[in-house]
Amino acid sequence: VWGQLIFVIPRSESWTLKKPKAASKKPKRVFRAPDLLQDFKELTDVQSYWVDVMLNPVNAISNVVISADQRQVMVVHACTFKNSNPHDFSAFGVFGCQYFSSGKYYWEVDVSGKIAWMLGVHSKISSPNKRASCGFVYDPDANHQNVYSRYRPQYGYWVIGLRNKVEYNAFEDCSPSDARFLTLSMAVPPHRVGVFLDCEAGTVSFFNVTDHGSLIYKFSDCCFSHPAYPYFNPWNCPAPMTLCPPSS
């Protein structure tokens, strides 16, 4: 052992520390994320139209419970709701108290903790017995094999939703015999969703507030022949949907 120490000490005396290189004074390039900055700016712009939307307990049926402050809606346990089709969650739909015929409006909904939800805008079509303005025939008595097929613009719904925990969809128009819907890709699952209604432009846009305001989906050329109402549906998930106060 002493022999090893005697050998190591002389070697350590021969070590020399290298002088560190001086840091370059040349300015470093700064890389920005233009898409992220643009999304944040767009979200900030639409948030200037934030309205204090409340849930309407008048049109809510026994399948859902609305909180006293009219900001939160929860579904009754799936085993207790009265509906002939156990996979049809249309009976869980709730409208906002406010309705809009002109102007621009924005609101945000907290959907954190939910594995299924649907939200957006609903407006009655011109006539339930005549061909709608977008060219489809409305039949309220139709037997929808796909229960999601009724949530389309041709029936007065401009909505997006989550189902099966990870499947995000936009419910666009298609032929009556084709009940497909668009699958949306989410880099960051939205815990808070912003909805922007522009009556003059005929658009309904959805923003992922959780992901710096990235645009989730935008409906264009919307036909609002009647006042438009905010629409909420907690589906078969017991976790609540909560309306956020303006600028919260």
Image (cartoon, helix red, strand yellow):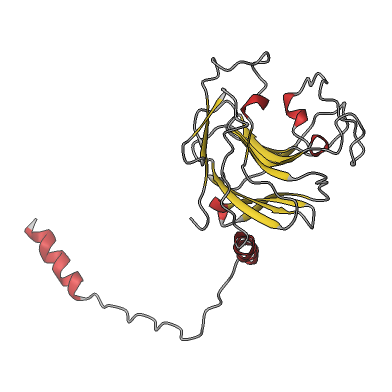
As drawn, the residue found furthest toward the top would be: 84
Residue at (85% x, 31% y) in the render: 128
Q: Is residue 6 above or below residue 145?
A: below
Front residue (pair 94, 184): 94
Query: Could you tell me residue 80's position as x and y percent?
Result: 54, 15
In which image quadrant can residue 159 be found? top right
Query: Could you tell me residue 226's position as x and y percent?
Result: 79, 44
Front residue (pair 103, 134): 103
In which image quadrant can residue 31 be found? bottom right
Query: Could you tell me residue 46's position as x and y percent?
Result: 64, 60
Front residue (pair 241, 212): 241
Q: Is residue 97 above or below residue 35?
A: above
Would residue 237 be found to the left or right of residue 181 on screen? left
Query: Could you tell me residue 28's position as x and y percent?
Result: 52, 79
As drawn, the residue found furthest toward the left would be: 2
Q: Is residue 50 above or below residue 165?
A: below
Quadrant that contains the N terminus: bottom left
* Total numbered badges shown on the rendered structure: 0
Residue at (7% x, 59% y) in the render: 2
Would residue 136 be found to the left or right of residue 101 on screen? right
